[in-house]
Amino acid sequence: MKKLFALAGAFALAISLSACGGGGSSGEKKAAPESKAPETKVGLISTTENVLLPEQKQQEVKVDDAEALEKKWEEKGKEFAEKKGVTSERIDATFASFSKDKIKNYHLYLNHNGDWKAGSKFKIGFYCQTVKPTTIDVWIAPDSDESSSDRKGQLTKVACGTDKPAEATWEYTLPADTNNLLIVRSQLPVEGFMVTTDELQQ
């Protein structure tokens, strides 16, 4: 009889320990630390010298009113430039619109005329904001009689901001005399604005 009571007591103790998680171990599981999503880099990504203007594959996106979108984003660019104190007449949408119902990619040329000499240094400023992560190419070269397909220049890649405009500044040194500095921006079918500045350094 005593043996029966002893077995019953041991069984009850085992149940009690099991309910408490057993001996010295805790029954509570620690929550795994939350992993943070990697931050997307914005602003200046890279600058490469002596490269051809990158080719663009045809891309387009259907929209309701491309002209209205272009006006909307150019206005947003002007508002940003005013608040930032950036002086530039080169405020553009990040997309091209040649028809009412589509936005597409395009090489947007900016011509800065002057009596520019080899060795002249320019400070380039580029600001852009888009509705989704987008990288824009900015290609710079002196205008010349050379075929555009053979002309080499400086290529800079800038990742646009989404919550606020990304800012990038860098230097360009003119390799030859020219009366026109070419700055080519690669528009893409993504809504947004870009502001471009170039200033001759004394």
Image (tube, rainbow, N blue to C red):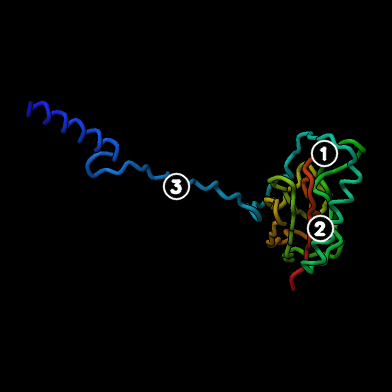
Mark 2 vs mark 3: which is more N-terminal? 3
Give the residue at x 74% y 53%: 129
Q: Looking at the image, which is closer to me, 49 or 98? A: 98
Q: Where is residue 71 in the image (x, y as percent from the top left)?
A: 89, 50
Q: Where is residue 162 in the image (x, y as percent from the top left)?
A: 70, 51
Give the residue at x 72% y 42%: 54
Identified by mark 1, the residue type is: Lys
Mark 3 vs mark 1: which is more N-terminal? 3
Q: Name the residue under label 3.
A: 33
Q: Quadrant of the C terminus?
A: bottom right
Q: Mark 2 points at which residue?
A: 181
Determine the image quadrant of residue 103.
Answer: top right
Q: Looking at the image, which is closer to me, 27 or 176? A: 27
Q: Is mark 1 on a helix, strand or loop?
A: strand
Q: Position of residue 61 (x, y in %)?
A: 81, 35
Q: In which quarter of the image is the N terminus?
A: top left
Which class describes the residues within 10 Å of circle 1: few (<14), some (14-19), or many (20+)? many
Which class describes the residues within 10 Å of circle 3: few (<14), some (14-19), or many (20+)? few
Q: Hey, which residue is sitting farthest front in the picture?
A: 1
Give the residue at x 78% y 49%: 192
- Mark whose residue sits in front, 3 or 1: 3
Give the CA distance from mark 3 to mark 1. Answer: 43 Å
Which class describes the residues within 10 Å of circle 2: few (<14), some (14-19), or many (20+)? many
Q: Name the residue under label 1.
A: 104
Give the residue at x 74% y 58%: 126
Identified by mark 3, the residue type is: Pro
